[in-house]
Image: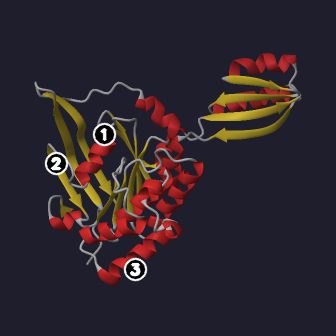
């Protein structure tokens, strides 16, 4: 069978909830268009309540859209064939804590129609993948947060789906747990799977993703490849370290920089824009000072996201 053009495609995906006895309308997701290619890692970035979880639940069929269209691996949402290619890790998984890791995966495999040697072999493979082989007989009630996240990924992969959706997989993990989760996600991509994951931890998104979708109040405010989002202002500021810049030189440099820090015989200056850098270099040469270093300051996703995340965005109700 040929590979579909899009692993996930949505058009004007919208979800409106009715709250309270009077049925007040709350738009959780507003006209979201997605076009995600097979084999991509796509991060959904947004504050709590931005609509990330609601989108994932609509993609998996757990929540019905109010309006809009969804296709999963080229098939319209709602068909049995559209559900089978998806593995899903919810943000707050509910696990049968009296089961061992092996028993839990066997139960999950049975729900997916697996049994016998095929299921047993898959359980062995997944426990090794997520690093839980040594604790396969331990009951889930004894698992740490990171171990539960890993067994959650294992259950999401039990039927070897081409599309894996992870809702806040880094939530509550310590630095070692986050590193292990990042390695797992990259391993899924290496195996040819499409991975969607949500987070409000910007560095994780920046490290892992081929593309990013930013959400504010249920609407997409930016989407694209990480490099493309950062490129327009990638080098808008520069940090210069200057040695031997005395009083007269400092007097002429001060109006040209946005930040000036003294460190012994050195001065660290932050300069905005190429033209200002040239003017500062002219002052350094005139003052017979020495330029120690000149470093462009790469804009981060956090700088892009934080202002966007605090904008007031009108979402039609």
Q: Earlier in the sequence, mark 3 or mark 2?
A: 2
> In this orientation, which residue lies closer to the viewer: 155 or 266?
155
Query: Which quadrant of the structure image shows residue 191?
Result: bottom left
Disc 3 crowd, CA 10 A, few/some/many (<14, 14-19, 20+): few
Secondary element at tag 3:
helix
Distance between the alpha carbons at the discs numbered 3 and 1: 37 Å
CB-based contact (under 8 Å), mark 1 and mark 2: no
Residue located beneath label 3 in the image = 121
Q: Which residue is mark 1?
A: 51
**Is 193 left, or right, of 274 in this rendering?**
left
Residue 140 image-quadrant placement:
bottom left
Q: Which mark is residue 38?
A: none
Indicate the quadrant containing the C terminus: top left, top right, bottom left or bottom right: top left
Identify the residue position indicated by label 2 in the image: 64
Q: Say which of 115 and 238 sits in front.
A: 115
Q: Is 138 rendered above or below residue 47?
A: below
Helix or strand or loop: what does disc 1 sit on?
loop
Q: Nearer the viewer, mark 3 or mark 1?
A: 3
Q: Position of residue 171 (x, y in %)?
A: 46, 45
Q: Are marks 3 and 1 in contact (CB under 8 Å)?
A: no
Q: Quadrant of residue 280?
A: top right
Mark 1 Cα-neighbour bin, 10 Å: few <14, some 14–19, many ≥20: many
Residue pictured at 76% horizontal, 29% vertical: 268
């Amino acid at each position: 069978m040929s590979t579909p053009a899009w692993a996930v495609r949505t058009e004007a995906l919208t979800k409106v909830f009715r709250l309270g006895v009077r049925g007040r309308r709350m738009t959780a997701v507003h006209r979201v268009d997605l076009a995600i290619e097979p084999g991509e890692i796509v991060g959904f970035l947004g504050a709590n309540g931005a609509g990330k979880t609601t989108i994932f639940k609509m993609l998996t069929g757990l929540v019905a859209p109010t309006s809009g269209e969804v296709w999963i691996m080229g098939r319209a949402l709602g068909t049995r064939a559209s559900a089978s290619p998806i593995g899903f890790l919810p943000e707050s998984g509910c696990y049968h804590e009296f089961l061992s890791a092996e028993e839990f995966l066997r139960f999950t495999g049975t729900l997916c129609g697996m049994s016998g040697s095929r299921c047993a072999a898959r359980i062995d493979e997944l426990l090794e993948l997520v690093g839980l082989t040594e604790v396969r007989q331990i009951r889930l009630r004894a698992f740490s947060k990171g171990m539960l996240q890993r067994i959650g990924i294992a259950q999401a992969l039990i039927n070897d789906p081409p599309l894996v959706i992870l809702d806040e997989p880094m939530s509550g993990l310590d630095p070692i747990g986050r590193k292990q989760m990042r390695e797992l996600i990259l391993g899924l991509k290496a195996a040819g799977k499409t991975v969607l994951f949500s987070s409000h931890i910007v560095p994780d998104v920046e490290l892992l993703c081929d593309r990013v979708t930013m959400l504010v109040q249920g609407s997409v405010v930016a989407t694209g490849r990480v490099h493309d989002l950062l490129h327009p202002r990638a080098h808008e500021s520069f940090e210069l370290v200057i040695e031997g810049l005395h009083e007269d030189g400092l007097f002429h440099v001060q109006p040209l920089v946005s930040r000036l820090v003294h460190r012994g015989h050195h001065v660290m200056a932050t300069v905005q824009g190429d033209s200002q850098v040239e003017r500062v270099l002219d002052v350094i040469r005139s003052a017979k000072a020495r330029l120690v270093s000149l470093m462009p300051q790469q804009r981060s996703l956090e700088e892009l996201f934080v202002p966007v995340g605090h904008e007031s965005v009108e979402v039609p109700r």
